Amino acid sequence: MSTFCAPDVLAAGRWWSGDQLDAMARVWRAAVLERFGETDRPIAAAVAASPESVALFVALTSLPSPVILLSTDPRAWRTEPPIPIGTPIALSPTMAHLAPEAERFGLVPLVMPDASARSIGGAPVTPLAGPGVIVFTSGSTGVPKPVFTTTAALLRSANARNRALTIERGAGILIGSSPAHGQGIQYLACAISVGCPLGLLDPRDHRLALEALAQPVFRCWRAAPHLVEALSRCALTGPPVVPPLCIVGTPIAPALFNAFQDRFGVPLRQGYSSTETGIIAVDNGPPADVRPDTVGRPVPDVELCVGEHPGESRPSGETGRIWIRSPWQMAGYGFPPHVERPGVVDGWWPTRDLGMMTEDRRLTLAGRLDDAIRTRDNRVVNLALVASHLRDIPGVVDAVVIPLDSPSGRSFGAVVECAPWLAVEAIRGKLAVALPPWSWPRVVEIVPALPRLSNGKADRRACGALLGQALPS
């Protein structure tokens, strides 16, 4: 295994050198060893999209302990299974306020010392030298589950992504998510493994985001749809420049795809990955071949099957469950040494996603297994199809369609993020032309911005609460 080091990091308009982060990591690594000793028990850390958190990640992953990466929102710490009582948790100085919350969860907090007040010599700290990391499923539809991925698997996934995106030393990566989330940890591993700069974007600050995106050192931006939408319509104070590779991980409306390309001259590419599987596919072809309706082709070493069973692949153009087999899947759900991989068939992981392959081996996503519901009118409705038609409406940025249960039976509703000039009546009129009556949402709620989780995904439970409040009696 190669020897890695802390990357150079851009955050809030300031560059932090790898040497600066390494100096912090040395002090914090020593503090952890002094308090807890060298052990193979898991250790947790609350991490954000910040240079401090990158330094803490470098420090902890150099130890022989599996590292549990937690959100800075303690509400996300309630997991199934729960974090073991007595687990140490390292908190950077800016996260010291989380110590009482950690104690309430039965964790043992250690606030890192001020690294600027002391220094420790010796060789640089080597990140990604430990056994692995634990991150969590999004929790958008249930309690988050811990996902343990070995360091070897994480690095194999990072190397596959770097090859697919031709990310090399010096060709930087920009992300807007914390290492506590699947995408954040995967792209951080990409930067560390190849030795390239890492940019951390705050999606709330469009100006600083545009300044960072325009820096020529960056080749790839892992984009969040809500920031893409904001940058596609905000007033510009300089040339519209973004990295040559801009990748989103969720479906995007054709109108947004076109608006972004018209402004920046670069297409929005879709990718497909998950916390459990790592990278699966990415649309990495020439710019003229990029399409908004596909996530591209599976990357090398990923086996993908669409069907009820991995041994029975459906013909091109037919929709079915997506099964994945690759050298970088998770070790299992849980906290080491107690991990399980339920549902695996001969190494094939059964995703909850539906999709279909085209004749030229591109993958198109078609929603999730639980997106097809039977309504109180005894009609089967594909909620992903309804959401797709909503995104096709001019002025719609994004939409979430979810089932609604009531004493009179099951129906469904839609939460729509759209331009302020678009009214519910206009949305219903467009759907009436495109879909049969049983595929019309019972309730449509317009919002200026979809509620989102800290990883950028739509918060389906919050959307359900909005629809419950708007549901007619």
Image: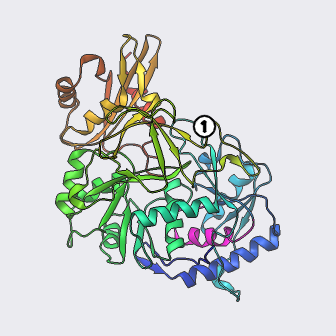
Quadrant location of residue 290? bottom left
Quadrant location of residue 426? top left
- Identify the magenta region: 46-64
Q: In the depicted view, which residue is nearer to us: 71 or 159?
A: 159
Q: Is residue 251 above or below residue 182?
A: above
Image point (37%, 32%), residue name: 319
Q: Which secondary structure lies at badge 1?
A: loop
**Residue found at the very far bottom of the displayed protein:** 121
In this figure, what is the number of numbered marks? 1
Side of 168 relative to 266 (left or right):
right
Q: In the depicted view, which residue is nearer to us: 214 or 328?
A: 328
Q: Residue 110 at x, y = what percent?
A: 74, 65
Side of 31 relative to 466 (left or right):
right
Image point (45%, 32%), residue name: 307
Q: Amino acid at mark 1?
A: Val
Q: Quadrant of the C terminus?
A: top left
Image point (25%, 50%), residue name: 291
Q: Residue 153 at x, y = what percent?
A: 60, 59
Residue 201 visible in rendering: no
Q: Is residue 55 magenta?
A: yes
Side of 288 relative to 142 (left or right):
left
Mark 1 is surrounded, within 10 Å at the Cα level, by few (under 14), some (14 to 19) or many (20 or more) other residues, namely: some
Applied colour scheme? rainbow
Q: Residue 44 at x, y = what percent?
A: 69, 59
Image point (51%, 44%), residue name: 324
Q: In the depicted view, which residue is nearer to us: 79 or 312?
A: 312
Q: Residue 271 at x, y = what percent?
A: 39, 52
Residue 432 visible in rendering: yes
Q: Quadrant of the N terminus?
A: bottom right
Q: Is residue 446 magenta?
A: no
Q: In the depicted view, which residue is nearer to us: 240 or 72?
A: 240
Circle 1 sits on which residue? 345
